[in-house]
Image (cartoon, rainbow, N blue to C red):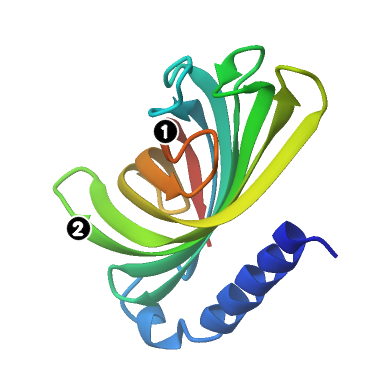
Amino acid sequence: MNRTLRFGFEVAAAAALLAAVPGAAAAQQLFNFTASALGGIGGAVDAEPGDGIGNRSYQLGFAVVTEPSTLVGLRLGTIDFGSGQVGNLVDASLNYLTVAGEYRFQESYFDSGLYLGLGGYQLEGTRLGGGSDDKTAIGLVVGATGEFTLNRHLGVLIELSGHYSDLDEAKFFGMVQGGLAFHF
């Protein structure tokens, strides 16, 4: 089993253990779990050469309420660099799996949040001279969220995130994404 897949299983197991403890939050929240699907733009902000943050990005998320206004969430996503260049790679993509703690603030017409966590990152692509390249590393994620509630079970979620990972071609990645959050 490769390192990225093994790391993904370890993160998923840790999240499953955390999912077993939302009982205390159930009395004060209308939901215990949130699933989200987001799309947007992202990219490597420090790649030389690089094509900025205008690349397509997608993300699936799952969060568990652990205490009132506190969540622990998994985010699985990708940035597709398309035919653009990231360092010495073309046709590259960044895949990631993060686990993060998030604190939510209730505003008058939306909820805002801040999160911080750890992740596994895989940058793959084709070297300029030919041949494929695949690098994996552990990194950090920090982000801000804003959710506009549509009803008890559905909201529009906007997310801004920054990622650091010690990869050869780029170390700093940023994303702006939006989509739907489902509460249950």
Residue at 47% x, 56% y: name it. 139
Residue density around tag 2, few if under 14, some if 14–19, many if 20 or more, within 10 Å: some
In the picture shown, does residue 42 fall above or below 1?
above
**Relative image position of residue 128 (x, y in whole percent):** 70, 17
Tag 1: amino acid? Met
In the picture shown, does residue 53 fall above or below 159?
above
In the picture shown, does residue 138 fall above or below 134?
below
Q: Quadrant of the N terminus?
A: bottom right
**Relative image position of residue 156 (x, y in whole percent):** 41, 37
Residue at 38% x, 28% y: name it. 45
Q: CA distance from mark 2 to mark 1?
A: 21 Å
Residue at 64% x, 51% y: name it. 136
Q: Quadrant of residue 146?
A: top left
**Relative image position of residue 65 (x, y in whole percent):** 42, 72
Foreground: disc 2 or disc 1 = 1
Residue that numbered label 2 is attached to: 105
Residue that numbered label 1 is attached to: 175
